Image (tube, rainbow, N blue to C red):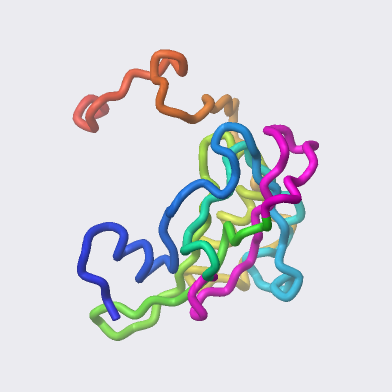
Amino acid sequence: MWSTVGPCAFREDVLGGTFRGHHGGSHREATRGILVDEQRAHPILRGVDDIWGPSDVYRTYPDGASLPERCTALVMGQPLLGLKPTDEPNTKKVALPVAWTTTWTGALAKAARVFHVTMGSARDYESAGLRRLTVNAAYWCLGLEDHITAESSVDLVGPYTPRASGFDYGKLDVEPRLPAYYR
């Protein structure tokens, strides 16, 4: 059943979850992606072997609950004890889903494939595994999973030097601008 209130309704009804808070320590704990064993044959995971990002794990459902039954978790996010890919897991925090699939049926009564990933800061995409996961998901959502290969390049084209995330714009040397500025 459609919720009728704001963007949260879209995120929960279509994507299967919404940001409810930081499960990992924001700007203190990175995320190690762990492929769900039962889903390793899923086309979206083809060629994906290492996912890591400096952003933390997000909680997308109430504490004590789980993803909706209609969702299939593909990758679990384990908070780490720091911001480096070599940092140890934070064993006081369980892994939570960071990538999953679901379907959504809109007004035309046609089911659509949906993929959702909670990772996605610019620095998270330094991870070739996260780039491959995202590219594979785009193909899968379009019904083109036969075109997903483990050998497809997800290499960066040109220099990629993303800035740290956050809201201290002065420290990040960022000047927020309205979209009209970029026209």
> Which residue sits at x=52%, y=70%?
65
Classify the position of the N terminus by image quarter.
bottom left
> Which residue sits at x=57%, y=60%?
99
Taking 183 as reference, is 121 above or below it?
below
Decide if residue 5 is on the left or right side of residue 42: left
Where residue 137 sits: x, y (%)? Answer: 55, 62
Picture mark count: 0
Is 6 contained in the magenta span? no
The answer to which of 45 and 168 lies nearer the viewer is 168
Taking 29 as reference, is 22 above or below it?
below
> Which residue sits at x=31%, y=64%?
10
Is 88 contained in the magenta span? yes
The answer to which of 70 and 61 lies nearer the viewer is 61
Where residue 21 sits: x, y (%)? Answer: 46, 49
Decide if residue 90 is on the left or right side of residue 182: right
> Which residue sits at x=31%, y=59%?
8
Where residue 61 sits: x, y (%)? Answer: 47, 63
Q: Which residues are magenta?
A: 66-93
Overall secondary structure of the magenta stretch? loop
Classify the position of the C terminus by image quarter.
top left
Taking 181 as reference, is 112 above or below it?
below
Where residue 78 sits: x, y (%)? Answer: 69, 52
